[in-house]
Amino acid sequence: MSTLGRLQPVSLREVWAHEALDFTQWLAKPDNLEQLGEALGIELYEAETEVSVGRFFVDILATDDSGRKVVIENQLAATDHDHLGKIITYAAGLGAEVIVWVAETAKEEHQQAVEWLNENTTSEVHVFLVQIEAWRIGDSLPAPRFNPIAKPNDWAKDVRQSAASVTQVSEVNILQREFFERVREFGLGAAPRIKRWQTPKAQHWFDVSIGTSQAHISLTTNSLEKRVAVEIHIPNNKQLFADLLDERQVIEAQLKMSLDWRELPERKACRIVIEHRGDSADPGQQAELVQWVVATADSFARVFPGFISSALSKSI
């Protein structure tokens, strides 16, 4: 039998001597922010430190894979009422929908407070309480571990909101959600370039992250016109669209497909679309449509991120 090492806890102050100068700066780096995101089940990007909120400064302001603002407040100590007030103040001042409170120790009363916030706010508000730990085996380098103590129960919120607005969700919306649930289930095993699939909602679109808040893949279904589509959706960056359009021939050659490039000059958003005829509500057509949507989305995730990253680097 192989000899195994034993995990040993390491004092956080041994790893990060100063909360603001050491830990916050460490956490804001992309690789470390990715570790935190993996523990929370979201993807985090574009971190800024010491962002002004009136007379105060939030430790880290980031963006998640849905383009939402994420407030991250750090404590290399036990949670306290002061920081509980800060996270609410920062989120309100910045219009953030995701709040992440990272601390060495989560007190029971603050865990209950975070759980209460998640249970009594709308589905747009998501609050996480996370313990940061450091461990080593023998003489190894210390390794961080993020341990979520309290997090949103999105399913419960969705159920509560659905019950409150049941008349607003049509049968068509329910069928659309069922279709995207099949897309997600198939995509988990058939789309290796897509890191994470969110839980579908009762709506005609389903967004997929490609590693930046500037653009994402959007899967759509049109029940009236009997078609599905996959697109690159650029919410508010006309220059990014123009730069990608300059590479149109190369992009389409790599994808082996022709795309519909929609600048939409009267709107903030731009779209790069390919459509496929078919009724997503028809059980007889669903398997073929699911396969097409997933394969196309995976191809988009293979080709577009490199071009988008290159275009965004030009504007820095």
Image (spheres, rainbow, N blue to C red):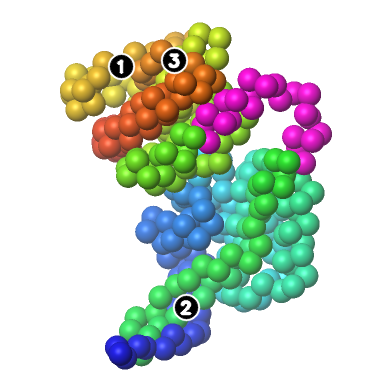
Please name which of the two marks, 1 or 3, marks the residue nearer to the observer.
3
Pick the front one: 78 or 82? 78
Residue at disc 1, secondary structure: loop
Q: Quadrant of residue 275?
A: top left
Badge 3 is on which residue? 278
Residue at disc 3, secondary structure: loop
Q: Which of marks 2 and 1 is nearer the N terminus?
A: 2
* Distance from Cα at disc 1 to Cα at disc 3: 18 Å
Where residue 6 sits: x, y (%)? 41, 88
Badge 2 is on which residue? 134
Tell me which segment is drawn in magenta. Answer: 160-181
Residue type at the position of mark 3 = Gly
Q: Is residue 169 magenta?
A: yes
Q: Do callouts 2 and 1 mark residues in contact (Cβ within 8 Å)? A: no
Instruction: Determine whether 86 is above or below 233 in the image.
Output: below
Instruction: Determine whether 188 is above or below 7 in the image.
Output: above
Q: Is 261 situated left or right of 310 in this image?
A: right
Where residue 103 sits: x, y (%)? 60, 70
Q: Is the magenta stretch mostly helix, strand or loop?
A: helix
Residue type at the position of mark 1 = Leu
Q: Report whether residue 87 is seen.
A: yes
Q: In which quarter of the image is residue 115?
A: bottom right
* Distance from Cα at disc 3 to Cα at disc 2: 52 Å
The residue carrying pointer 3 sits among few (fewer than 14), some (14 to 19) or many (20 or more) residues within 10 Å by Cα, namely some
Residue type at the position of mark 2 = Ala
Residue at horizontal 48%, vertical 55%? 37
Q: Is residue 178 magenta?
A: yes
Residue 241: assigned label: none
